[in-house]
Image (spheres, grey):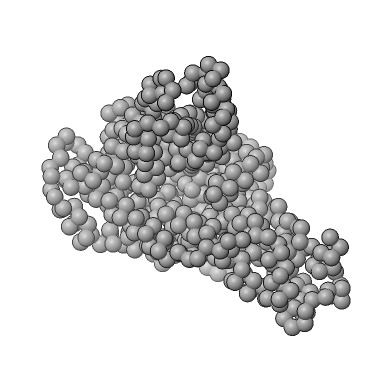
């Protein structure tokens, strides 16, 4: 080691480690202990109550409704987003090996890329506010206005227990799909064109080409995309907090409640900080369970090309 | 090359010119053009689904309340720019906008400065605890932020970081460090060692070598990470919601959500649409100007 190396290492790391330790590591570490107390945030003392919060959690109906909604999001959002993403990416990509091997995809591919990608850049909360107006229960909203043109009565999208949560899932899918279209088109265009040529000469149908060649060749990317989407789908907080009835209640009647929002309400509206942190630990377990399950399920032979 | 063109005729080439094998390949150009119509049909449908809500929002921003309530389709009677002035000043969207720009600028600068320093040291210096430092930062990526918010709320208050714009930027930076360290460490490892060796021989100190030689070399990596960090912080909703308690410190996402609730009662919809437009259009302008860099940076980041 060079002279003064150690002093450099220490001075360079001091501030970032201090800040990170105090603001990130310490809250994570503390939260496990807080979840074992009945802390209400007002009094400085925290009474240790053992696993009481977790016992209460297991018996809490709203908690299980929230878990269920999170699980639905984790299953539906990645599945639909990946399916639509792969579908549109294939549509954009198809033209590439049809157009004399050198094209950049269907006509207008560049425009599609620009348009599709844009929602991904918008703040989820802003998109939530936008879609609250799109879903407006009267026919002055965009969706009900459009349905009115074909004679369908206005639907109270966000006020009805049956439609509120699917409507919110649709918003997340709306803003996610474009990024994955771009990602998959990039992955597809890194596959050598000769392979598609060969398949075509052998008389493979488009369907076969997609399932037997394209998909296996970009499987790594799809897998990473699925895990990334799933972990983000576990959040749902911003969209539920912005779009659900009465300023983020998770309503109507917990029909859109998710763990993140339930934790937020428990902590910052009911001041039950101990219990809220126990919900946080449950969310961590759900995240880890999802990551483990996804890694097991998606393991598949890697194809080199 | 000529072989290629005969083997793979474009969609416009006559079917006779194609020496395709018989069987499933037959009649492909007929199905091909039908498929082409379908292809564009599907692609255009999604493009419309993306554009229409956004365009509708911008159009609605010019309408009066009465026009908004009467029909979602009618065009505004006039281009009422005053709606934007109303949203910017009366609904305080202007303040939220400036707050967001301040916090994201400061937060990104802090994230990159600290992230690059930690990454450089971890990637280039062998010291006891090197792996531990790296592990400590990277493990932060696996925990959901929700787990931290209750203790963070109290820590930030006691350190006076709560309800302040620089304070929020510091919290953003701390929570973005795992991502920055993870990517930049990998980046610094790819840079050649010979340059820093030469700098040392020429008498450059540790800081001099880092700041004048290595940091400029890491620019492409910093730009990629920077794009992600800016977007992430611009998007942030949870942290400002728990930390910024007074309305004058709200960021855009939070202020707009708040406006949506209050305008819902007050019935001033045109200000809400104008506020939405103010939060969407600048992103669109930046995106269209740096479209290639943004898409390229984000996609290669995800593919690697």
Examine the rendering and report whether any part of residue B62 can be seen. no
| A84 left or right, relative to A38 | right
Q: Residue at x 59, y 41 (%)?
A: B283
The N terminus of chain A appears in which quarter of the rendering?
top left
In percent of the image, x 16 and y 45: which residue is there? A38
Residue farthest along the top direction in this orientation: B203
Residue A117 appears in the picture as rendered: yes
Seen at 52% across and 59% down, the residue is A220
Q: Is residue A147 above or below residue B155?
A: below
Whole-percent x, y for residue A247 in the image: 38, 48
Residue ID at (56%, 63%): A303
Q: Position of residue B133 (x, y in %)?
A: 36, 36
> How many numbered dots are placed on residues in this image?
0
The relative height of residue B73 versus residue A25 in the rendered view (above or below) is below
Q: Nearer the viewer, residue B19 or A107?
A: B19
Please state the horizontal and vertical placement of residue B113, each as a whole percent of the image.
48, 29
Residue A266 or residue A200, whichever sits in front: A200
* Quadrant for the C terminus of chain A in the image: bottom right
Left or right side of A244 for B208: right
User: Residue A152, position in %: x, y?
Assistant: 55, 69
Q: Looking at the rendering, which quadrant does residue A231 occupy?
A: bottom left
């Amino acid at each position: 080691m060079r002279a003064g190396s150690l002093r450099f290492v220490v001075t360079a790391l001091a501030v970032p480690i201090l800040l990170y330790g105090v603001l990130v590591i310490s809250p994570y570490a503390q939260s496990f202990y807080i979840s074992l107390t009945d802390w209400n945030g007002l009094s400085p003392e925290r009474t240790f109550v053992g696993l009481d919060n977790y016992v209460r959690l297991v018996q809490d109906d709203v908690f299980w409704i929230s878990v269920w909604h999170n699980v639905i999001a984790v299953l539906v959002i990645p599945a639909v987003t990946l399916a639509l993403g792969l579908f549109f990416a294939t549509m954009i990509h198809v033209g590439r090996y049809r157009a004399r091997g050198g094209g950049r995809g269907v006509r207008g591919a560049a425009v599609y890329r620009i348009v599709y990608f844009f929602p991904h850049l918008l703040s989820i909360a802003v998109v939530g506010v936008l879609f609250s107006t799109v879903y407006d229960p009267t026919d002055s909203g965009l969706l009900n206005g459009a349905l009115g043109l074909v004679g369908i009565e206005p639907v109270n999208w966000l006020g009805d227990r049956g439609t509120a949560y699917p409507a919110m899932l649709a918003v997340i899918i709306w803003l996610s799909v474009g990024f994955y279209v771009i990602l998959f088109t990039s992955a597809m265009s890194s596959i050598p064109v000769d392979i598609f040529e060969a398949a075509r000469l052998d008389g493979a149908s488009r369907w076969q080409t997609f399932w037997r060649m394209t998909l296996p060749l970009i499987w790594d990317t799809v897998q990473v995309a699925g895990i990334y989407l799933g972990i983000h789908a576990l959040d749902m907080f911003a969209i539920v907090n912005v779009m659900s009835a009465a300023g983020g209640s998770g309503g109507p009647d917990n029909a859109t409640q998710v763990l993140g929002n339930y934790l937020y309400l428990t902590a910052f509206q009911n001041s039950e900080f101990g219990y809220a942190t126990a919900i946080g630990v449950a969310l961590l377990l759900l995240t880890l369970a999802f990551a483990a399950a996804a890694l097991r399920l998606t393991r598949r032979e890697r194809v080199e090309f | 090359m000529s072989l290629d063109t005969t083997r793979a005729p474009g969609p416009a080439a006559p079917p006779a010119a194609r020496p395709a094998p018989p069987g499933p390949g037959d009649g492909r150009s007929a199905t091909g053009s039908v498929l082409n119509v379908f292809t564009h049909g599907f692609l255009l449908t999604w493009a419309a689904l993306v554009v229409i809500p956004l365009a509708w929002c911008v159009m609605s921003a010019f309408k009066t309340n009465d026009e908004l309530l009467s029909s979602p389709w009618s065009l505004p009677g006039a281009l009422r720019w005053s709606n934007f002035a109303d949203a910017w000043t009366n609904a305080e969207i202007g303040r939220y906008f400036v707050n967001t720009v301040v916090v994201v600028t400061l937060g990104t600068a802090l994230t990159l400065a600290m992230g690059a320093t930690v990454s450089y040291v971890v990637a280039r210096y062998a010291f006891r605890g090197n792996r531990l430092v790296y592990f400590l930062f990277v493990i932060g990526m696996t925990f959901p932020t929700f787990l931290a918010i209750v203790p963070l709320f109290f820590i930030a208050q006691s350190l006076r970081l709560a309800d302040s714009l620089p304070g929020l930027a510091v919290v953003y930076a701390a929570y973005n460090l795992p991502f920055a360290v993870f990517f930049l460490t990998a980046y610094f490892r790819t840079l050649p060692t010979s340059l820093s060796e030469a700098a040392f021989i020429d008498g450059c100190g540790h800081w001099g070598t880092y700041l004048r030689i290595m940091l400029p070399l890491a620019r492409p990596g910093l730009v990629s990470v920077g794009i992600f960090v800016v977007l992430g912080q611009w998007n942030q909703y949870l942290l400002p919601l728990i930390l910024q308690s007074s309305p004058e410190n709200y960021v855009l996402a939070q202020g707009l959500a708040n406006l949506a609730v209050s305008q819902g009662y007050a019935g001033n919809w045109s200000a809400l649409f104008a506020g939405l437009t103010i939060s969407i259009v600048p992103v669109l302008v930046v995106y269209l100007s740096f479209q290639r860099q943004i898409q390229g940076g984000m996609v290669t980041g995800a593919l690697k």
